[in-house]
Image (cartoon, rainbow, N blue to C red):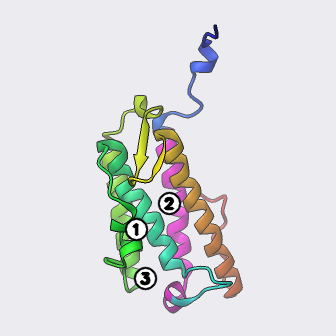
């Protein structure tokens, strides 16, 4: 029979530190959005990848209803999200930044209601993705990093120096 040691029960990161880490990534992604020329944010694409506005909307769609789902266990289905339905997608960079900031504020509000004892709970995120709360949270951050990387490729191809990735 295996027993847990005190070291095995110690968290690698606490809830407050995780939120700070996530918000630092969100701040960096916001600076990537700001770096895009307006037209290119909505139209520029390389190799069949989606324009960055669509990638940013996917990040918003995972973060905003995602944190609500993790806290309340009430999930929207993927096809109900703006990036999937096409509804509510901003038409200007300013609108996208406002939506980004509203999502950041929503994350802060709902995170205050999140309890760390939920990290190991099982969830069915967006009615599709089964996993633990912790793995779902890591996915949200990983997905943002992945899409921000695509934004870096776009900016470099446009001759624009992206924000330094380590300045979170």
Query: Which is nearer the eye, 121 or 112?
Result: 121
10 shown above or below 46: above
> Where residue 135 appears, x then y in whole percent?
53, 43
**In the figure, is residue 155 to the left or right of 141?**
right
Residue 10 appears in the rendering: yes
Place of residue 97 in the rendered image (x, y in percent of width and height, measured from the top left):
40, 74
Within 10 Å of disc 1 (Cα), the crowding (few <14, some 14-19, many 20+) is many
Residue at figure coordinates x 66%, y 62% from the top left: 165
As displayed, is residue 81 above or below residue 160? above
In the rendered structure, are the residues bearing label 2 and label 1 in contact, judged by CB atoms less than 8 Å apart?
yes
Residue bearing mark 1: 100
Q: Secondary structure at mark 1?
A: helix
Please name the residue shown 54% across and 57% down the image.
25
Residue lying furthest front in this view? Answer: 128
Front residue of this view, candidates 72 and 92: 72
Mark nearer the N terminus (2 vs 1): 2
Q: Tell me which segment is drawn in magenta.
A: 17-42
Lower position in the chain sequence, tag 3 or tag 2? 2
Q: Position of residue 91 (x, y in %)?
A: 37, 86
Q: Main secondary structure of the magenta part?
A: helix
Q: Residue furthest bottom?
A: 39
Residue 9, horizontal then vertical, whole percent: 57, 19
Q: Which mark is residue 26?
A: 2
Instruction: Tell me how far mark 2 sits from mark 1, CA to CA.
Output: 9 Å
Q: Which residue is mark 3?
A: 93
* Image height of 137 relative to 118, above or below: below
Going 47% across and 64% down the picture, which residue do you hit?
59
Q: Quadrant of the C terminus?
A: bottom right
Per the rendering, the mark at residue 21 is none
Q: Is residue 20 magenta?
A: yes
Per the image, label 3 sits on a secondary structure element best described as helix
């Amino acid at each position: 029979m295996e027993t847990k040691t005190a070291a095995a029960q110690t968290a690698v990161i606490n809830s407050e530190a995780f939120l700070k880490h996530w918000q630092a990534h969100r701040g960096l992604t916001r600076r990537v959005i700001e770096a895009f020329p307006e037209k290119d944010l909505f139209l520029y694409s390389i190799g069949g990848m989606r324009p960055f506005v669509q990638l940013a909307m996917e990040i918003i769609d995972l973060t905003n209803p995602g944190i609500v789902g993790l806290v309340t266990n009430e999930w929207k289905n993927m096809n109900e999200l703006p990036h999937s339905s096409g509804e509510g997608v901003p038409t200007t960079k300013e609108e996208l930044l406002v939506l980004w900031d509203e999502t950041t504020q929503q994350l802060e509000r709902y995170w205050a209601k999140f309890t760390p004892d939920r990290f190991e709970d099982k969830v069915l995120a967006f009615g599709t993705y089964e996993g633990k709360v912790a793995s779902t949270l890591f996915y949200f951050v990983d997905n943002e990093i992945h899409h921000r990387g695509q934004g870096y490729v776009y900016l470099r191809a446009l001759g624009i120096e992206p924000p330094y990735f380590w300045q979170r």
